Image: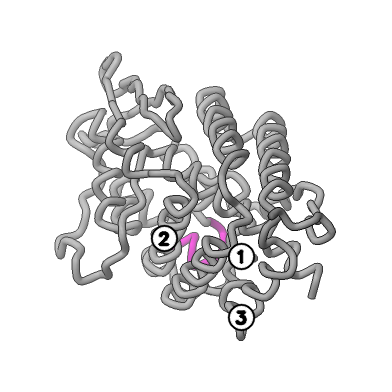
Amino acid sequence: MQRFHRHYWQGLALLLACSLLQACSSCSPCAVFSGADDKPEHAAVHGADTPSAAVTDLIAHLRNDDLPALARSALPAGLHAEVATAWQEGRSRWPLTELPLDDSIPKVLTALTQADAESRLQQSFRQQLSGQTRAMQDAARGLGVFGKEYLGREGHYNLSQRQHYTQLIDVFSSWAASAPLGDAKRGQQSIALLVKAAEQGGINSDEDFSRLGLDASLEGLTPLYVAIGQILELYGLDMAATLASVKVETVSEAGDEAELRVSYTLAGRPIKTVMQAVRVDGRWYLADYLQAARDSLAGSPMEAIPQPPPTDTQDAPAER
């Protein structure tokens, strides 16, 4: 049981980091989940009218808590259909594979949906982590180092992505170093939010992703996505402010290709990145998303992602 809880907290930290990276990689907000009834009835179109809208349209879908629409807008119709088929066959998990350390997601979902998950995790938090802010901040810094090392050696990120994600990890690590990570009240609230969201989503394993398919899986992950945004806000990371600071500029456009400059502020620090957009059948898409979706169709078994060494905080003295 002790090992289970240690791996759970490690996996949860990875998932939070991944979700932060994904939110910022498309400069997206974490809105309050209000259910499918509040979403637009019409299906999202594939692609965008302009290069800059290839980014801003994705933001709009995330504002509406519509992850399936995000995946639809990000890909041409034919490629989207191929990815959807590959989801059911277990060959693709795009767009989840846009997240560094995405392999941790099914493990965390399993932990959150086990019987008596909330009471067990609340007890574990009280016994091992409540009051351990300093130790958890050290662990967050360690995760940041591990994340940068992973990005440096992993082959499927291009230079622009590595630079962008490295900036995000630096900011995340800096923020976590001063965040009240061991605060008892926030910890209890966070666990309750995550367990409720996981129960609402109804996904507890990778097999469920295949059974449900692309759209239903992304719909099921929406409550968890929103809960993570709420948790980040509990600990002082305001994603709404990040959204308000986003600027997208078309630097150049030649034929069916365009270069975008995206800048925003995260936790009070500026982030800048460059994205490439391409036009396919008259519609604009982010080039990295198209390539990643195509690569996911190869269906080759994904290598296990190395995990950082466990940080054991149970023996650290509680802070007063």
Q: Residue at x 49, y 50 (%)?
A: 235
Where are the magenta residues, as a range?
84-92
Residue picked out by circle 1: 108
**Mark 1 vs mark 2: which is more N-terminal?**
2
Residue 233 drawn at (x, y percent):
42, 51
SS for dot 1 = helix
- Closer-to-camera residue (87/159): 159
Q: CA distance from mark 1 to mark 2?
A: 23 Å
Q: Amino acid at mark 2?
A: Ala
Query: Which residue is outermost to the right?
Result: 315
Q: Quadrant of the N terminus?
A: bottom right
Q: CA distance from mark 2 to mark 3?
A: 36 Å
**Mark 3 vs mark 1: which is more N-terminal?**
1
Do labels 1 and 2 touch, CB within 8 Å? no
Q: Quadrant of the C terminus?
A: bottom right
**Color style of the picture:** one colour
Residue picked out by circle 3: 119
Dot label at residue 219: none
Residue 296 in sight: no
